Image (cartoon, grey):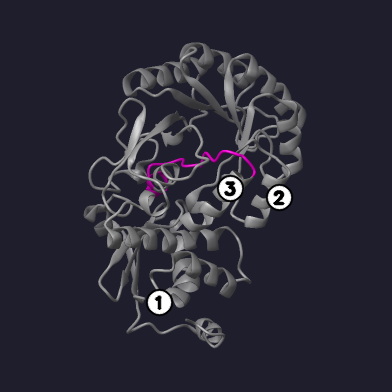
Amino acid sequence: MSRIVRMETFHNEFVCFVRITAEDGAFGWGQTSTYNADITAQVFHRQIVPWALGADSTDVAGLVHLIERREHKYPGSYRARALAGLDTALWDMAGRRAGKPVASLIGGAPGRVRAYASSMKRDILPRDEAERLSRLCAEKGFTAAKWRIGAECGEDVDEWPGRTEAIIPTVAKALGDGIDKLVDANSGFSVPRAIAVGRMLADHGVGHYEEPVPYWDLEATRAVTEAVSVDVTGGEQDWDLTTWKRMIDMRAVDVVQPDVMYMGGLSRTLQVARMAEAAGMPCTPHAANLSLVTMCTMHLLAAIPNAGKYLELSIEGDDYYPWQRDLFLGRPFEVTDGHVTVSDVPGWGVEVSPAWLDRSSYTEAALDTFRPSAYGSLYHKGGKP
């Protein structure tokens, strides 16, 4: 056992990195979920730190489970987003200690992972999206690409009238037969509309239909899944394991898509992947930006036996996501022949940019100086490890 003695956060509004140090000097880098990361950093220090400081740094899943119980009055997205910072930092620490990549710690190995070019844009004309995706597939060797249809939570109101009917055949034809085709509706349709669009997708060779109806309505999702031949996929927003069990048991989707950071880290994501494996379902995680979530997902896909066909890799550059500029040293997401590489570097295999850290807001909690709030003291009486 080596206790956690220091927990640091470095954040701006979009990203919060976590560094955890143990008493043996081992350390690891993790990340909470992106967006409103300044709020998540506060949750981390209020509801994660009091239970993690002084705890065993080698029992990642056990500590995550403990905090879920100690913070049982505060389930929900922000607790999961904050837990991700702890979990991913401790997995990085474990890999650095062992001298192995995380993929190897969970039963996989370093190597190449097939990626698909994932477009986030809706404010783009069909012909322009077709040109962009075709060009990237030619330049980077992608053999799969995803584009957006409908409007996000649009209730059958398209991004502009007729866009969905125009963009499906335009992009599908431009990509041709050699490229796997995926679309994302972001909960945009009603069941009847989603089924009609699903049949159009099948006619144009699209094989992946993401969040066709409001994701929280599992019965509606299942109705679409049962009515169309295209694979219906979903789950990126979900963090609750009970919801995941129900989703998988009722076959609401064909492919599960947990997000490592929304889920609360690798440990809880592995639980979802194993549930899906037991049900004979593939796992193609959500990873919609080039922060640590994509690197964690690369390691996950290199290890799980029911890994989906490809990794989601955002093609939006720093002009679209300026906050992701220069997060890491080097080029960890370099694409060669349509693949990215999980290296044999220990841990996640990346180092956070010192220049980025220097620009961030900083908070530290150390075991020898930590003074819990009244809230924290009350819970400590219940038995902090």
The mark nearer the N terminus, 3 or 2, is 3
The residue located at (34%, 62%) in the rendering is 94
Q: Which residue is mark 1?
A: 53
Classed neighbour count for the residue bearing mark 1: other residues with Cα under 10 Å, few (<14), some (14–19), many (≥20) = many
Q: Please give the label number shown on residue 246.
A: 2
The image quadrant of residue 1 is: bottom left
Give me the residue at 64% from left, 50% from top: 244
- Can residue 190 be seen? no
Above or below for 123 versus 350: above
Give me the C-alpha separation between circle 1 and circle 3.
Answer: 29 Å
- Residue 285: say if magenta: yes
Three-letter code, disc 1 = Leu
Q: Which mark is residue 384?
A: none
Name the element at disc 1.
loop
The region drawn magenta spans 279-295
CA–CA distance in space, label 3 to label 2: 15 Å
Residue behind mark 3: 237
Decide: few, some or many residues near mark 2? Use Cα within 10 Å; few <14, some 14-19, many ≥20. few
